[in-house]
Amino acid sequence: MARKYGKKNVIKVNPLAYNIGLIGESGIGKTSLAKEVCELLVGEDGYIICNIGKEDGIDAIPGVQYEDIPDWDTFDEFTEDIIENKLTDYKDLKVLVYDTLDELFKIVESEVIRLHNKEYPEKQTKSIKAAFGGYMAGEDKAIELILNKIWELKKIGVSMFIIGHTKKRTMTDVASGLEYDMLTTNMSHRYFNAIKTKLHVLGVASINRQITQVKTGKKGKDKKDEVKGLIESESRIITFRDDNFNIDSKSRFSDITDYIVLEPNEFIRAIEDAIKIEHDKQSNKKSIEETKVLQEEEKDKLVEVEATKKKEEIDKKREDEERIVLLEKFKILMNTIKSNGDKVKKVSAKLKELELLPKELESSNIEKLKELVEFMEVIAS
C-alpha cells in the first residue's frame, strides 16, 4: 500500500514563485527596481505597486502600474476585488509590490483598534498597545491580518514583493552580550521579523563607498600627521548574504551571490542563478525549461480552482448579507401593512405566485425574495 503522506519537493524555477523582499534607505531606487524587475518577468499588466499610506515614491517613476492605498479599508476593498475577479479582470496579474511594509503596518493598526472597539465596546481604546488585552496582542493581530491577506492572494497566484526602509541600529549579541552595528529595518522588529521569516530572499540596498585615508598635511594635538577619509567611488548595491552579519539580509538559497549592483537584470540573474544551482542538485533530470512549463501548467490549474472557490465564497457571503437586509425589510413592511386586509391578501398572492413560504424565506431564492420585497414596498407606499 502506498504512503498516504509525504512528497518530494521540486524546486520552483519562477523567481516570483518565491517571497521576495527589498529594504533600503529612502531614494536609493527600491521602487524603480521593483517596477523594472516585475516588467521584465511578467510584463506591464502582470504587476501592481501598492502605494501605501504616506508613500509617494511612484510620483517620479514614469509608466508605473500602481494603486494608491491610503488606509486599510481601501487595501481590503482593493485586494477583495482582485480575489473576486482574478480569472477575469486580473487574469494577467502575477505579483503585488507592497510599498512599503512599514506603511502597511501603520494602516493596519487603525483596523486592529477598530476591531477591538467593536468586539469590546466597554473597553474602548485608541492604542494598539492596549488592543485585545495588551501584552503585544494588538501587534499580533496586525501581523495576522496582513499575513492572512497576503496568503489569500498567494493562493490565487498573486505573489508578494515587499519593500521597506532601513536604518543603522546598535544590536546586542545574545551569546557574548557585545554590541555591534547593523543595517536593518527602520520599523518594529516584531513586525519586521514576522514578515522576514516568510521571505525566501531579502535584499538590502545600500551605498558601497571606497574610502582612502589621505594625509591632510596638518599635525594633530599628538603631533602626528592628520588623516581623513576621501571617497574615491560610490555605487549602489544589493546585499543578499553578509558573512559579517552587519547587514540584515537573508536568502534561503545557500549559493546565492553575496551582493550585486542595484540593477534589475542583475537582481533577476542573482535569483535565477541561485534557483538553477538548487534545481540541478535534484535527482529529477528534467531541464529547467521543462520544469518551468510543467510548473506553470500546474499553477494555472490550481489558481483556477482556488480563484473559483474564493469567488463562490465571496458571492455566498454577499448573498447572505443581502438576504439579512431583505428579511429585515420584509418584517418591517409586514408590520406596516398587517392592519390592511387588502394589502395582506396581495402579499399572500405574491408569495403564492413566487412559490415562496413565509417560514422558508431564510433559505429561499434571493432573486424571488428581492422581487417580493420590492412588490411590498410599492403597495406599502
Image (cartoon, rainbow, N blue to C red):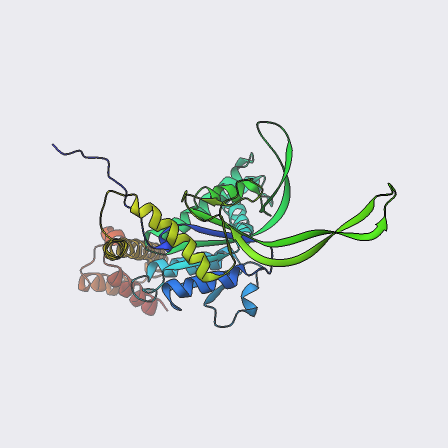
Give above or below for 298 relative to 373.
above
Residue at the (18%, 35%) spot, across then down: 4
Task: Work out whether residue 104 can be spotted.
Answer: no
Q: What x and y, as percent, mark residue 79?
A: 41, 58
Q: Is residue 346 left or right of residue 166?
A: left
Q: Quadrant of the N terminus?
A: top left
Q: What x and y, as percent, mark residue 287?
A: 25, 53
Q: Return the residue nearer the eye: 284 or 202.
A: 284
Task: Work out whether residue 337 can be spotted.
Answer: yes
Give above or below for 143 relative to 161.
above
Q: Quadrant of the C terminus?
A: bottom left
Query: Which residue is outermost to the left?
Result: 1
Q: Is residue 158 left or right of residue 171?
A: left
Q: Is residue 263 left or right of residue 276?
A: right
Q: Return the residue nearer the eye: 11 or 128.
A: 11
Residue at the (33%, 59%) spot, across then down: 84
Q: What x and y, as percent, mark residue 370?
A: 29, 63
Residue at the (44%, 46%) spot, across then down: 199
Q: Return the residue nearer the eye: 219 or 195.
A: 219
Query: How many labels were placed on the picture?
Result: 0
Q: What x and y, as percent, mark residue 309?
A: 27, 53
User: Where on the picture, by quarter, is residue 159?
Assistant: bottom left
Residue at the (33%, 65%) spot, across then down: 92
